[in-house]
Image: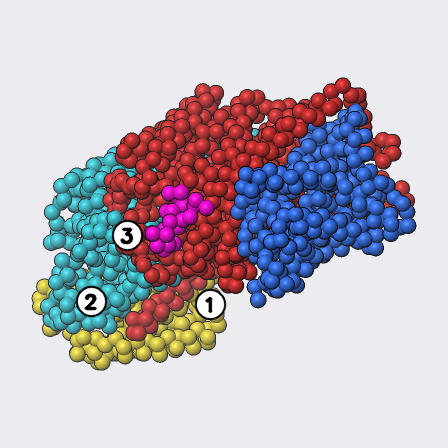
Chain colours: A red, B cyan, C yellow, D blue
Amino acid sequence: MTPDTILAVFFCSLAFFVFGGIAALILSRFNTFASFWGAGVAMGGSLIGLCAVSAGFAVGHPFQSVLRIPLGGFCTLHFGFDPLSLFFAGITLLLGFVTPLYGLGYLRAHDDGKPAGPHWFCFNGLLAGMLLVFLARDAVGFLIAWELMALTSLGLVLYNHEDRRVRQAGWLYLVASHMGAAALLLFFLMLAHDRGGFAFSAFMAHRPTGFAAHANLLFLLAVLGFGTKAGFMPLHVWLPEAHPAAPSHVSALMSAVMIKTGIYGLLRALEWIGPWNPAWGWALIFIGLSSGLLGALFALANDDIKRLLAYSSIDNIGILTLGIGIGVLGVTYHIPLMAAAGFAGALLHLLNHALFKGLLFLSAGAVYQAAGTRQISRLGGLFKTMPRTALCFLVGAVAICALPPLNGCVGEFLIYWGAFKGYLSNPTAPIAPLLIAVIAGLALIGGLAVATFAKTFGIVFLGEPRAPLAHAPRDPGLLLIIPMLILVVACFSVALFAQRVVSGLSPVLTQIAAGGGAAPETILPLNALFRPLTLLATVFALILAAGLALYLVRRRLLKNRPVAAGVTWDCGYAKPTSRMQYTPASFAQPLLDPFTPLLNRRIFSRIPRALFPKSSTLSTGSSDLFQTKFFIPLVRSLNRSMNLFRWLQTGRVQIYVLYIVIALIGVILWSFH
Amino acid sequence: MITALILTPFCLGLLAFVLRSDLLRRWVLVLGAAIHLLLTGLCIWIPPSPEAHGWLALDAPGTLFLALSSTLFFAAAIYAFGYLRVESDSAQHQDLEDGFLFDNEPEAVFCGCLLFFLSTMTLVAASRHLGLLWVAIEATTLASAPLICFHRHHRSLEATWKYLLVCSVGIALALLGNFFLVIALSFHTAGSHVSLAMADLQNNMSGVNPAWLKAAYGFLVIGYGTKMGLAPMHTWLPDAHSESPSLVSALLSGAVLSTAFLGILRATQVCAWGGQLEFARPVLIVFGSFSVLVAAVFLFSQSDYKRMLAYSSVEHMGIMALGLGLGGTAIAGVFFHAINHSLTKAALFLVAGNILACTGTKSSNQVHGLLQRLPFSGTLWLLGFFAITGLPPFGMFFSKLIILKAAVDQGALVLAGVLLILLAIVFMGMTTIVLRMCLGPADPNRPITPERLSSVLPPLALLLLALLVAWVWPEPLRNLIVESARLFDPQFLPGGHLP
Amino acid sequence: MNELIDFSMMGLILLNLVLLGATRLIHSVRLVAIQGLLLGLLPLWGIADAETSLQVRLYAISLATLTVKCGLFPWMMRRIIREGPTHREVKPSIALPTALLTGIIALALAFWISHKLILPNPRLADTLIIPAGFFGIFTGLLLIVTRRTALSQVIGYVALENGIYAVGVVFAHDAPLLIELGILLDVFVAVFVMGVTVFHINRDFDHMDTDRMTELRDSPP
Amino acid sequence: MNLLLPVLKIIPLLGALLAAPLIPGLINKVKAAFAGRRGPPVLQLYFDLFKLIQRGAVFSRTTTSILSAGPLLSLVSAGFVLLFIPWGPLPAPLAFEGDLVLVVALLGLGRFMTVISALDTGSSFEAMGASREVQFAALTEPSLLLILLALARMGNSLSLSTIFTALPPDQFVACGPAILLVGIGLTIALLVENCRIPFDDPNTHLELTMIHEVMVLDHTGPDLALILYGASLKLWIMALLLANLFTAWAAQAGVLPASVLILVALGLVAGLIGTIESITARLRLVKIPQLLIGAGACGILALFLLSR
């Protein structure tokens, strides 16, 4: 296919989203039909788009086309694609194909007479917005797509807007994304001023060969703008509110793909700004470490399963930012192996996170739907009633903990590898301590992730139910299971074919590294990564095989033996109840204790009084440090300082005339100036 | 032609005063609006020749604002048709906030003044003489004052009083500005009569006295700025907008502020001809930024949603003044901004009227679940909010972009940054109000009233028009904006700065 | 002729100072009426130099000014005072001595401005027109800012008008149109609108105290 | 030789699979000697395994298949780690640039599975053990990686198989202090990974004080056998790493002499563990993190010494 055809196919997919979405809105009256229609066009459009992506990778070079839309008569919109955007578009469309199916079942199950048309309109709009973000080839089109994405996802988040907390989340999300967009606007305006045009081609054509004028400011603005979307600490505050508020398939789409548009933008920004400053690598690594560690800690401290997953997204964004930071350092310090591994690890982790976080959100949604609560401390023993969901969640959990034999391990392995290589290449370099910190930090993040997901899986699915549920939970129907299974298969296949994935990504990686001013002849030594990746995949396959073999042996051993069922060892206590099980808060407590001030943890207790106390309670809660200690006070003080000026509008007309007098005197003085 | 444009609504207004039948009078109102709209369309199609010694002529900005006023008036007239029918159902009305009873102004006065109002606005747009312009702007104040106190109760009276006093002080200062201009001109035209017609001014400004010109400009900016709502002279604006009937607020915000902006535009033109543009620019930039700041302060924790719209008008007038001050490429953005602001804000005020009629309160704290209770108005309210805060795909996004681009291009990075922060604060304030109102469960105790077509159609049409203008960009409009921009930048090329 | 102008201007300045110190409404009305008389006669000084067509206009201007400023205004305001509630005082919100002091500062400011802005006409350059005009404007604004009743604000507004008119009227020869516009302003604003509104305020509020008209505001109570 | 090498590489692996249960036996002997007892026979673990494998099983009604997946996968993961551990000069059966990271990840998999299988029982005791386990693991992993980084720095390689052979004898002495620090760190890691005193007491009988043992309370029969065997493999792995480190100076001497040395070293490690277990008491739980961070500090210090 020629690039033009591919772009046309992309637009065909966009047309599916846009017109299909509008049709769903119009068809709102026929609710069932509108749902099927809306989900159908989303899946169809994604499928068409995926075809275009696979064809686009075959083109292998950037392509740009101009669409003359007389926007306000002042500009034209450009569209096109290159390896970087194809990669992101591919992930988006994959999730765009999987999640509508789930959403169809999910929304039908808690049918409360709410019209489905607007929801599917927004859903398709979000897909269109994300696709346009990747296809846009000029700043104006990019910003339009960016806001389209924000607004449609806001509509999705507000699906249950009868709930006060959902409304608050929606407000926070809208405000945060607007702030981010404001930073981006300034970023693009400055860039357009420097480069003489809004088209990306102009950004690239007039890229400075040396260090760009106010490049650091540009980088800062890009981090602020794109980081808000990606959820960098401490710009993340909207994320743990908005993701749990949305229906689960939307949370999956947002967490798996939408926040990645921030990473896409950051990578693009790095490409545009020009030769990189090593300081940016440092900055990215600091951001990565703080997001990763704090995200992991907040996740561990949380009791709401979807909120926990949202924090874990921040943690994973941190990990892949570490990868990008290592890549940037690799390019700026001329350590090709480190650059290759860093960027490859970041991209691979991005792909992996999309898959396993999507999977985790989908299965968490199934749990929420079946059990009617998202509080981990009220759940338990769901493995027996919902085995399929539990296994899907387990796959996701193992993957997100970066454990073999799943895909999460591969991406993090590459990031470790890059850090190790970077350190070994020059252990006395100034970046050496930073790399040590990266390695230790990654390990700590990994440990915290293990604790988090051991807690989540163990408490939710294992043991006994901790609280009576509204209705007996059971595995969801096929509409919900099939999407999860697709993602499970995808997780395994990325793990087993990691080497192919990385070699397939080589044009993307080369493009990214070229942006940093790496000389065109220094091609990233991706081949050095292939042997470790192949071996890794072999080991994974062997582990699966060995596990299966051992399982068969064990079954054979127990075949003709007495297998009895009893009670769990209760230390001789006569009457254990399910409420005596360990709580998630207790499970996490030893790890969290050292971080109490960071987590803003509080202990609520009712101390038993009198000789024979009837009841007493003890519970802990933690709130987001940045939200409670920074943003809320900030807004409050803003409010207070704004209120200080409200006396200006006193209601007394005399004072109003006085203002005119003051202005008049000011102008007269200025005119004599 | 232009005379016909001015006189038709005037005569129909007189007719409205003497007619007995309310229904007939409403038809006269709609008829006047329709005829005016048609004539305006004709004017765009065939540019009319100047009249009255060149005192009345339509140049590009004039035509632009005339078209805007006419469109808004037509929408408001249709809205008024349904509005007046509901209002005339009972002789006495209960006050929504305090519960006392009040009666309305006679409908004859209301309709008549509305048509006079249109006539005066046309005069503003068409006058090519600074003195006439001044008279016309003063006349808009006088014609609109009775409109504001349509509901005769103490609050609307208070608003009217403030409107009159503050605007009159402003307009008196503008008169002094005109006097100073005459003085400035008479330095080199000693003995002969001094003419304030734009055509003469353009040729006579070369040897003008700078000190008097600066003073004149200062007074004109203060005077017309009062009418336009530039801070700190904006104080009448929130009161008048919140107390007047919504369709009047729509006209005030959408049309009157823009026509007052025309006054400042003319003054700046004269200042530029006199070689004092470098004096004018900082003045405009300071007033513009200060207006945005004041709007941000009062929008941040506003609870009255009509006042919110009023302060948002202050903000946008600030942006327009700022853009005019920046000059260059920003000028086209300013005109585009004016179009977007007028259409969107008028639509929002009309929707606010629907909301007020349904909920009976102007406090946003007591309005919830609009999307469910008033599905059409609620959706329009939300969309209008997106449009007015400059989110794509609405045109405000582009006009803001163009103005900010001009700021960055001129190296005013700090200004652009501060402006963006202030706009973000404004956005925060407005989001709080609008989301609070639109979302949430509808109060089950209140019946869901079906919405009238005449109350939903005008705002919908205005919003659609705003969207259409931004994306389809009709040729005549494009020419008007380009010509307007060329008044300040003869080399202006559309698309020259935004490839 | 300049002496006549300066005499009128001195009169204006003095009347303004007295206005700042006046305590009774009816007294203030009288003061602005006298100002109107002075201003009404102003176009007639030097009328002999003008051509015939202009002379007619100047007479007309003079007559109109006298009618409006000396006749219509005082009559209207007296009526309001008579028919309104019992308040007959100006009700200043700052003490009168302070107002007078501020007025003197404003006078100094006006003279300072007149040094910066010099009239082009050498004949008029050293007259008191500019300082008197600016002082009139400042006085008017000061009265609006510091008085509490609607009517005394209207009086302030008229004083402001008179100041502006004083600046304009000397150019009656150069641009008579503008003066006519100024009269138009008076007629419209003062007579039709303010008068009508003040009547309404009188009727609906039982007071004319604009200090108490503060329901519409954003500041916390 | 080239043909023989693959075969040779398998021998240590097979040896480990067979001989791993010896180490706990040796440790117990040393401890018994310290206590003045005769103690169980060295082969006791073999007897236990043999006995358990023939048994049936009892499961709690609360549990699911996760309970038995835990021991199974932790054994598999330990087994796969063995594939990457060299035997002196003899490279591991599988070796590649970066295998030391994979080793850590594999150990993590085993731990994760053990933890969730403990949670499967729904018992508070086991959950408490699991909670402590993840806490220590989260702190051990960074320390272990830092120690491995120091090792990688010494051998300038990311593969365990080349690290130990890359240190020529003359450099070995120069690196002495660093090696000692790495050794200390590795020992701490060994003790905590294998739940030995002072971190955990494998012989305790009070559920509240246990960490690892309490997590496997409800495993019976073949499952318990898998656990015990897996634990012994883990012990072997860490001990072998220590042995490799301290015999690295002799790596050039040839396979056979090196093998003898390593065997001796393994014995010494077992003796060391036994000694430590005999002469120290269990640490208070709150003190344990400090020691774990100390291990990481050893790694950083070693890195500092090496980069001087």
Q: Which mark is residue C92?
A: 1
Q: Is residue C124 left or right of residue B466?
A: left
Q: Is residue B470 above or below residue D176?
A: above
Identity of the amino acid at label 1?
Pro
Could you tell me if residue A228 is visible in this image? no
Do callouts 1 and 2 point to residues on the same chain?
A: no
- Residue position marked by numbered label 3 in the rendering: A205
Element under disc 1: loop
The residue closer to the viewer here, D100 or B111, is D100
Q: Is residue A157 above or below residue C101?
A: above
Element under disc 3: helix
**Residue in the image at 56% along x and 32% along y:** A541
Residues shaded magenta:
A506-528
Residue C113 placement: quadrant: bottom left
Q: Is residue A641 above or below residue D128?
A: below
Q: Chain of mark 1?
A: C
> Which one is in front in this view, the residue at disc 3 or the one at disc 1?
3
Q: Chain of mark 2?
A: B
Number of marks? 3
- Residue position marked by numbered label 2 in the rendering: B275
- Provide residue B25's location: percent of width, then percent of height: 30, 34
Identity of the amino acid at label 3?
Ala
Task: Please tell me how crowded label 1 is: few (under 14), some (14-19), or many (20+) other residues with Cα within 10 Å.
Answer: many
Could you tell me if residue A205 is visible in this image? yes
Query: Would you say residue D110 sits in the magenta stretch?
Result: no
